Amino acid sequence: MSIANILNDRFSVRAFRPEPVAADVLQEIFTAAQQAPSNCNVQPWQTYVVSGEKKDKLKNLLVGTVMKQQAPNPDFNWKVAYDGIHRERQFGSANALYTSMDIAREDKMKRNMAMLRNWAFFDAPHVAFFTMDTYLDIMGAVDIGIYAQTLTLLLKEKGIDSCMQGALGQFPDPIREFLGLPEGRGVLFGMSFGYADENAPANKCRTDRAELTDAVTFVS
């Protein structure tokens, strides 16, 4: 499958079947992802893949933390307030998801429960946390984004679905303690992955993309 076909085929999966990805396949994919480019080849990513009983234990810790309704305390700046066209796209994305799940805009309880599933990893058999040294700031974040995109394309090439989740960087304390992260290391974001539950309403959601002329300017 070509990269273009993979890009057209993949979407953010928010419901997974329970069966795990074979360990040798995970080793192959994450080894290949090491070829991702980075600024000055610093390779800042320190990725933690959590599966099985450990994943379930961490899920319970995170869900319990979020349900306390405390304010998020991310290791990095997640305080961007979208405006203009970016806010319109944000609302459009949320509307597409909740419409696919038949959740009305005014049904706050169902929306909150749907949001909570982020920290339950959408029942995926695996979750990856992308961490890096906090001093790297935006330069490190750029490299992590490139690495994560490389990873999700490699996963999809093997028929494995995923969902990138900024939400998994909002409450890093239980993650940091659970994984034993060293001082000065932060959780940037996470990714749930596995095999999609094709019958789940959430996986019927699709979002649109801007026209090329709105996104790219060719200068010659």
Image (spheres, rainbow, N blue to C red):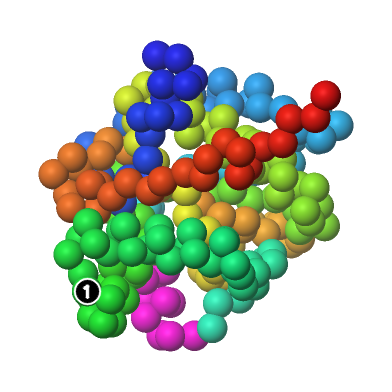
When asked about the image quadrant of residue 109, the answer is bottom left
Q: Residue 44: x and y, percent? A: 74, 41
Residue drawn at the location 23% of the way across and 47% of the way down: 204
Which residue sits at x=43%, y=66%?
A: 91
Q: Main secondary structure of the magenta part?
A: helix
Q: Relative to 8, say whether 75 is above or below.
A: below
Q: Residue furthest left?
A: 199
Q: Nearer the viewer, residue 114 or 50?
A: 114
Q: Position of residue 187 (x, y in %)?
A: 61, 58
- Look at the numbered disc 1 and give the secondary structure of its residue: loop
Label 1 sits on what residue type? Ala
**Residue 148 location (% of width, % of height):** 57, 39
Position above or below: 140 against 97: above
Pointer 1 local density, CA inside 10 Å: few below 14, some 14–19, many at least 20: few
Name the residue rendered at 22%, 37% in the picture: 19
- Report how many numbered discs are placed on residues in the image: 1
> Residue 160 appears in which quarter of the rendering?
top left
Q: Quadrant of the C terminus?
A: top right
In the image shown, does 216 or 111 lie closer to the viewer?
216
Q: Is residue 152 magenta?
A: no
The answer to whether residue 119 is above or below residue 124 is: below
**Which residues fall within the magenta stretch?**
56-70
Q: Is residue 172 left or right of residue 54?
A: right
Q: Residue at x 48, y 59 (%)?
A: 89
Give yes or no for residue 64 being in the magenta stretch.
yes
Residue under numbered circle 1: 104
Q: Residue furthest top?
A: 1
Residue 195 image offset from top left, x and y in percent = 27, 36
